[in-house]
Amino acid sequence: MTRLWPLPIFLAAIGAALAAEQPPRSGLDYATPGLRAMQADDFANPGMLWVAEGEALWDKKDGMGGTSCQSCHGALSSMAGIAYPRRDPRDPSRLMNLETRIEQCRVDRMGAPPFGYESRELLALTAAIRNQARGKQSSVVEDAAAIAEGERYYRMRRGAFDLSCAQCHEERAGKHLRDETISQGQSNGFPAYRLRWQGLGSLHRRFQVCNNAVGAEPSPLGSQEYIALEWYLAWRGRSLPVETPAVRQ
């Protein structure tokens, strides 16, 4: 006997399948003309202030060893092809993104204190590194287990509103929520400058904002859950060019 699915479940499944077939679109496609112009002009893009600070930090000697990022890695431009998140080579069960890798380098290699997640210094250095690949296709490490874990988080309903990331950023992408157009939730522009923040912010800060919006308990910045989600989003939007620092509402 053919099984008949209840109509709401059937329509939801069809909607999710059609959404999944949509080609990746940057958040820039959903931005206003003014924001697009601001992002395109390096003199008008406020995120470039952080990039300039990060470029200076790359060469700044610090810590007990009196070394800098440049001491080990050479020119900042050498970072154009790096791909994060990835697994910690010392503990493959642990996921690392660019921010946690920088903090590890400061402590273990330079003998310097960590900057602290979401600090201006860490945002600046992360933005400067990501900016080296601006305009190039995002680099993603293929790791089926980590990507699957991130997708599980992406599709899990949570919070007082019982919503998942996918319900907003797949099923409702392009629709309006108050004064904003819902984007696909791509990550290729982070760290990004948001007008609402009046500053640069990390992708994990954006995750926390979304968690709060649906009435869910946010995970800590730099948590394994968020790094897995970051990994899945990078894989999901792997055909998009890097835009760091993007400008968003």
Image: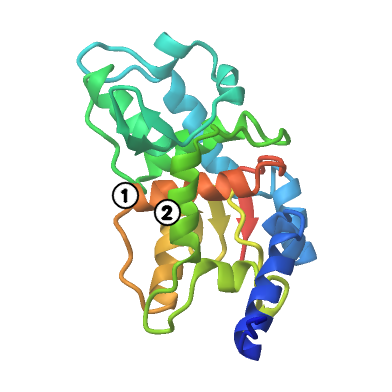
Q: Classify residue 124 as left or right of residue 222.
A: right
Residue 77, label in figure: none
Q: Amino acid at mark 1?
A: Ser
Neighbours of disc 1 within 10 Å: few (<14), some (14-19), many (20+): some
Q: Residue at x 32, y 12 (%)?
A: 67
> Which of the 4 image quadrants contains residue 184?
bottom right
Quadrant for the N terminus in the image: bottom right
Which label sits in the foreground, 1 or 2? 1
Q: Amino acid at mark 2?
A: His
Whole-percent x, y for residue 45 in the image: 65, 49
Whole-percent x, y for residue 69 in the image: 41, 18
Instruction: Tell me, yes or no, whether the two marked residues, 1 and 2, touch with CB atoms within 8 Å.
Output: yes
Question: Could you say which is closer to the camera, residue 4 or residue 168?
Answer: 4
Q: Would you say residue 194 is visible in this rendering? A: yes
Residue 204, label in figure: 2
Local SS, label 2:
helix
Question: Could you say which is closer to the camera, residue 234 or residue 203?
Answer: 234
Residue reaching furthest to the bottom: 7
Neighbours of disc 2 within 10 Å: few (<14), some (14-19), many (20+): many
Location of mark 1 (residue): 223
Quadrant for the C terminus in the image: bottom right
Whole-percent x, y for residue 51 in the image: 54, 36
Q: Residue at x 63, y 82 (%)?
A: 3
N-terminal label among 1 and 2: 2
Q: Is residue 48 above or below residue 198?
A: above
Q: Classify residue 115 as left or right of residue 131.
A: left
